[in-house]
Amino acid sequence: MSNPFKFGSVVENNFFTDRINETEETKNVLSSSNHLILISPRRFGKTSLVNKVTNSLDRPVIYLDLQLVTDVPDFATHLLKKVLKIDKWENIKHLLANFRLIPTIALNPLTNNMEVSFVPTSSNNFTPLEDVLNLIEKIGEKGKRPIVVFDEFQEIIDLSKTLPKQLRAVIQHHKNINYVFLGSLESIMRQIFETKKSPFYHFGYLMTLKKIPYSDFFDYLKTRFDAVTDKSEILSNEILVFTQQHPYYTQQLAFYCYSFLENEEYQDNILNSVIDNLISMHNNDFERLWNTISKTDKKIMITLALQEKISSIPQPTSTIYSGLKRLLTKGYIIRDEQYELDDPFFKKWLKGKINE
């Protein structure tokens, strides 16, 4: 059999790990008239979970990563491109005639994709986006209800100060769309959806995606390692102890261990050998990361690597809080039950440097 572990992209089918309860919960929300807010650190599997559920519902899905959007008109452009992929041109073209700003649309013969552009003015910056959103609602009126997924939704804060209010004013009237808001920065997502003054206050059903439980992840790993070793229980446990059940890094480490076992017999030091090889592969990346962060951030990361208390850092509380917030935003640390380094390989690399 081929390597049963996958990392670095959306995970589907047999590569998908557990999430039975979360899958059912997500399906129930999207089968209702409600919207879904899903929060977790990066690489915890938000997109894979939503992708699995939406694939099972036989409905049109529009997925847009807001990290790719540069401003509000660009938001409208990207979104309309996605719309043009879910329905036939013949069904949509007459609806575009109702746009207040008619977009330029052309077929690219090299990619066979539609090229879209708007020319908004400063006085109607939001108009194209509003028209595209209402277009999706009209598509839903005539057929299956679309599901619109906005990944890294916290990015709207940086696109425009007025965008949250404008966006809410439009989509609150939509009855034929389920919106899904994915976010990796918990503090900002909760600010958007749980602050009373926010336009999106309690706008949808909020879920927080945690690490996969140890027992479920252990069974997932063991079942797959059974194909290449009779030491699957030992190896599965060692992997989970090292990765602390982080979905992405568990899949990554399991992939390389499986590849090793396809060619070599099990050895007592297999895990350390694979980990050392991976750290060696990423040594330059870790060096660059370390050389680009401030001294305060370095102190925080060293403290977390050594599993010491944050309060032991000899810096003002406000300075430490700002550093933690900065590192969370960059994705270098996560907060599950407590603050911890996101990457277990970087953690071991850093501890090695400290002990040199």
Image (cartoon, helix red, strand yellow):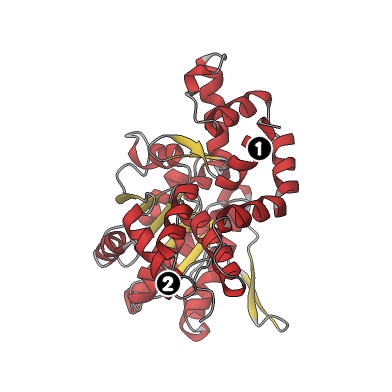
Q: Residue at x 65, y 60 (%)?
A: 119
Viewer-nearest residue: 128 or 63: 63
Q: Which is nearer the N-term, disc 2 or disc 1?
A: 2
353 left or right of 82?
A: right
- Tally the marks: 2
Q: Is residue 128 visible in the rendered structure shown here?
A: no
Viewer-nearest residue: 206 or 25: 25
Q: Amino acid at mark 2?
A: Asp
Kindly indicate the quadrant of the structure image that contains residue 108.
bottom right
Q: Position of residue 261 (x, y in %)?
A: 56, 70
Number of the label disc, if any, that sits on residue 93: none
Q: Which residue is mark 2?
A: 226
| Residues marked 2 and 1 touching at CB (< 8 Å) | no
Q: Position of residue 110 (x, y in %)?
A: 73, 82
Q: Quadrant of the C terminus?
A: top right
Q: Position of residue 221 (x, y in %)?
A: 42, 64
Q: Which residue is mark 1?
A: 352
Q: Is residue 207 visible in the rendered structure shown here?
A: yes
Q: Amino acid at mark 1?
A: Gly
Q: Residue at x 62, y 47 (%)?
A: 122
Above/below status of 82 relative to 36: below
Viewer-nearest residue: 338 or 103: 338
State the SS at label 1: helix
91 left or right of 124?
A: left
